Amino acid sequence: MSESSSARGVVAAATLVAALTVLPLLVALPGALSEGPARAVEYLFRPRIGNLLANTGMLMAVTVPASVVLGTAAAWLVERTALPGAAWWRTLLLAPLAVPSFVSAYAWVTVAPGLTGFAGAALVTTLAYYPFVFLPVAALLRALDPGDEEAARSLGLSPAAAVARTVLPRLRPALSGGALLVALHLLAEYGVLEMMRFQTFTTAIMQQYAVGFSDTSGSLLASVLVGLCLLALLLELIARGRRRVARLGPGTQRQAMPHALGAWTVPGLLFLGALVAGALVVPVASVARWLAAPGGWAGVFDGDLLATVLGTVTLAVLGAVAATAAALPGAWLLNRHHSGLPLVLERVTFVASSLPGIVIGLALVTLAVGWARPLYQTVGLTVLAYAILFIPRAMVSLRAGLAAAPPELSEVARSLGARGSGTLVRVVLPLMAPSVLTGLVLVALAVGTELTATLLLAPTGTETLALSFWREASQLDYAAAAPYAAAMIALSAPLTLLLRRQILEEK
Amino acid sequence: MTELRIRAVTAGYGRDAVLESVDLTVPEGTTTAVLGGSGSGKTTLLRLIAGFLRPSGGEVSVGGRTVAGPGVWVPPERRGVGYVRQEGGLFPHLSVAGNIAFGLPWPRRRHRARVLELLDLVGLPASMADRCPDQLSGGQQQRVALARALAPRPGLILLDEPFSALDSGLRAATREATARALRAAGATAVLVTHDQGEALSFADEVAILGAGRFRQVGRPAEVYREPVDAEVAGFLGDAVLLDGIASGGAVSCVLGSLPVQEGVPDGHVLVMVRPEQIALTPAGGGHLDATVRAVSYFGHDAIVELDGIGDGIGSAPSGTVVARVLGQDAPRSAERVGLSVAGPVRAFPVGPSVARPLSGTAAR
C-alpha cells in the first residue's frame, strides 16, 4: 500500500536528517584524540583549562539562577497580580529577545566602560537571557487553571502555601526548560564575553581558531564544551521530573483572579521598570546615541548597509528554508507516533542542535578541510550549519502546524471525496500555513543575528549585519557599528510581537 | 441500491483482532445502531466501512459494489460513504458554507442553493452559512457536520457517536434533527453508540457488539424484550436476574410462578424481569408483599429497591429486586407494598454446574 511506503520514505528522510546533524560531531570530535589519548589528557589537565572551567562554572552559577528568579518573578507579577499595565509589561519584558546579546554588551560597554570581566558578563547575560524563562513561565501561568489554586485555598491552605503546592510543582517543566535554554546559550555565548573580556571555552576556541586553525587543541576544547552541554541536557532531564503535567477534565477555563499587591505595587513596578531599563532601554538608547554621533547616522545612507541587509536576508531565507525542510519529516513522524524511532531521532537532532554554534562550525570546518575541501567557505556549508543549529525552532512551529491539521480532518476530506492531493491542497496546507510561516520567520531571524558559526563558516567577503557589526565594534568604532545594531534590532522587533501573540495570547 | 453488507470481516491493529468474522446487513434506507462498550470494536467497524482501515479478511460491499475484500480495495474518497465523527471535525479554516460545500464537485461549490437546502435539512437557519465553525455551539457543529456529509448525496452515512459530546438537552434535539434529516435524505445509516436509549430510539435495527462480534441483531423492541443472554439484557437496560426453575411454560422464582416466553426448556434457568414489568400495589394487593428499601427518584419515574420478599423460592443473584414506577406513584422508604409481575418474563437456561442450590430464604 502506498501509505506505508510513503511512511517508510518519511522515516528514511528523518533518519537522514538526524544522521546529518550528528555527522559533523562524529567526524570532527575524534580529531581531538588524533595525537593519542595521552597527549589529550596532558593538554586538558593544564591550569588554563582549569581557569576556563572555573570561569564558565562561575558564570553559569550566577546567570542561570538569576535569570530563573528574575524571569519567574516578572512572569508572576505580570500574569497573576493586579499590577497596572500588564499588557504593556508583557511586551516590554519580551522585547529584549529582539536585541542580540552582543549588541546589548556593546551598549553596556559604551555606557559603563568600567563594567567588564565577570560582573559585566553576568549582568549582560542575565539581562539578555531572562526572557527565556519569562516566556515559558508566563505562558504556563496563563494556561494553568486557577481552579487548582482555589481548590487548595478551600482545603485550608494560605495563599502562599496554595501557590507553593499547586502552582510551583507545575511550573517545573517551564522552569527547567527555561534554565536549560539559558545554560545552553551561556555555553555558546561568544560576543558578550569577548566584549566583556571574560574567557570561557567558547571564547578560547574562537581565539585558538583565529590564531591558526589547529585541529587538535580546538577539537579538544570543543569536546569539553560538548561534554558541558550534554551535562546541562542531562541535568534538565532530571530536574524536569517524570510526572506529566496535564489539565484534567473538560470545561471552560476561567480567568485567574489577580492577587492584589497593595503596598507592594510600587516595589513591583520599580522591579519591572529596572529590568526593562537594563535589558531594553540601555541597549536601544545606546544604539540610538551612537547612531546620532558623527559617523553613525551617515552609515545608514551608505550603500554598504543596504548590501549587508540584502546579504543577511539571502542567508536568512536560505537557512530558514533549509531548517524547515529538514525538520519536516521528523515533525510529521512525531505528530503521528510520539514514541519509538521518531522520538529517538528527535532527541538525537535536538542534542546535536543544542550544541554551540562554534562547535557545529568548527566541526563542519574540520570536515570540509579534511574530506571535502571544495565545500570549505561556501554558502552551502554555512546554510548546513544554520539548518543543524535551528532545526528545533522550525520543528516547534511545524509541529504546531501539523497539530492544526490533524489526520482526522484529512479523513473527513477523503470521505467527502477529496483525493490525497486535494486533501493536501484544500485542508492540510491552509491549516499549516500560519505556523510554517512563523517557523520560517523565527529561523530567518535567528540566522540574521547569528555570529559565531557565521564567523567561522561564511565565505570570505560575506557581509551580514552581525558580521559587519562585529567587525566595527571589535575595532572600537562604535559609531560605525550603530547602524548595523539598529538594523538587527529593527528586523528582530516583529519577533517579539510574533512570540507574544503566539504564546501569550493564543489559548 | 445502497444496502450495506459486511461478510465475515476480520480486522484489527497489529496482531490483535478487534473484530472477528463479523456479519452485518443494513437494508437500504434504514438505520442500524451498533451498540457496544468501549473497546468493543465499534469505531473499528466504522473505519472499515469508511475505508480508513483494511480488513484482514472478509468482504464489505456498499450498494452491491464490493469496496473491500480479497484483492479489492476502494479508497475512501471513491466509496460514497459519509462519515460524521464524535467531535464534528469541521474544517476550522472554512465557513459553514465552505464546510458543507467541501465534498461537492468544484463547479457547484459556489452554488448557494445546495448549501441552504442542506442547512434547512438539518434544521439550521440560512443565516448560519457565513459563520465560522468556532462561532457555533456543539450541537450546531454536529448538524453542520451532518449537512456536510449529506451534501455529496452519499448512499451510506456513518455516525460515530455524534451526540455523545453534547449535553443532554442538546443531545435529544440534535438526535431528532439528525433522524429527520436522514429520513428526508433517504440515506442508509450506521450509528455507533454506547448509549442504549439512543440506540433503541434512533434506529430501525440494533446490533449489539461485544468482544469483537455481534451478540444479537434485531429490531429495538425485539432485542430489548428477548435478549439472547443475561449480558445483552443488562447492556440494553436495567434487568432483575433471579434463579428459577422452568417447567411447562412457567418459571418459579422469588417472585412466584410467572409465565415465561416460549422456547425455554424445563430445568434450572436465570429469570430476567425488566423493572417496569413489576407493578407496585398497596400491601396485600399483589402476588406478594415486600418492603421498600430505597427509592431513586428521577421525576418522570422512580426506581424502587425491594426487600423482604420471602414467600417464593430462589434468590436474586445479581442484587435486589427493583421496580420502575411512575414518579408520581413512588412509595416511601420502608413502606410495605404489594407487587405483581406483568407479561411473560424471559429465562435463560443454565447448566447444572452454574445453577446455585435453591433456597427458601429471602432474596439477598
Image (spheres, coloured by chain):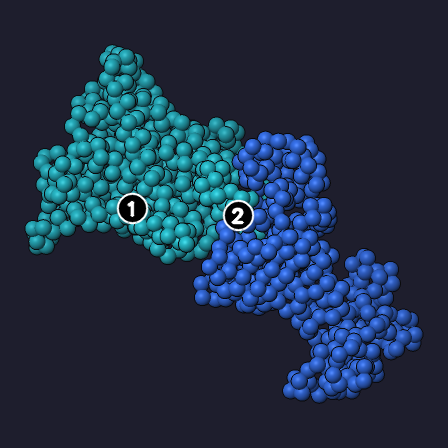
Q: Looking at the picture, which amino acid does disc 1 mark? A: Val
Left or right: A171 in relation to A124: right
Q: In this image, B138 relative to A184: left or right? A: right
What crowding class fits label 2: few (fewer than 14 Cα within 10 Å), some (14-19), or many (20 or more)?
some
The residue under label 1 is A17
Label 1: few (<14), some or many (≥20) within 10 Å?
Answer: many
Residue A475 on image: x %, y %: 17, 23
Q: Nearer the viewer, residue A443 or A15?
A: A15
Image colour for chain A is: cyan
From where the camera sits, is residue A356 visible?
yes
Q: Quadrant of the N terminus of chain A?
A: bottom left
Q: Position of residue A295 (x, y in %)?
A: 23, 13
Quarter of the image for residue A424 reads: top left
The one nearer the camera, B241 or A487, is B241
Front one among A238 and B93:
B93
In three-dimensional space, the C-alpha distance between marks 1 and 2, rounded to whole angstroms, equals 36 Å
Q: Mark 2 falls on what kind of element?
A: helix
On screen, residue A28 above or below A95: below
In the rendered structure, the residue with mark 1 lies on which chain? Answer: A
Q: Classify residue A209 by image quadrant.
A: top left
Name the residue: 66% across, 32% down.
B113
Residue under the point 42% across and 43% down:
A399
Which numbered mark, 1 or 2, is in the foreground of this view? Answer: 2
Q: Which residue is mark 2?
A: B78
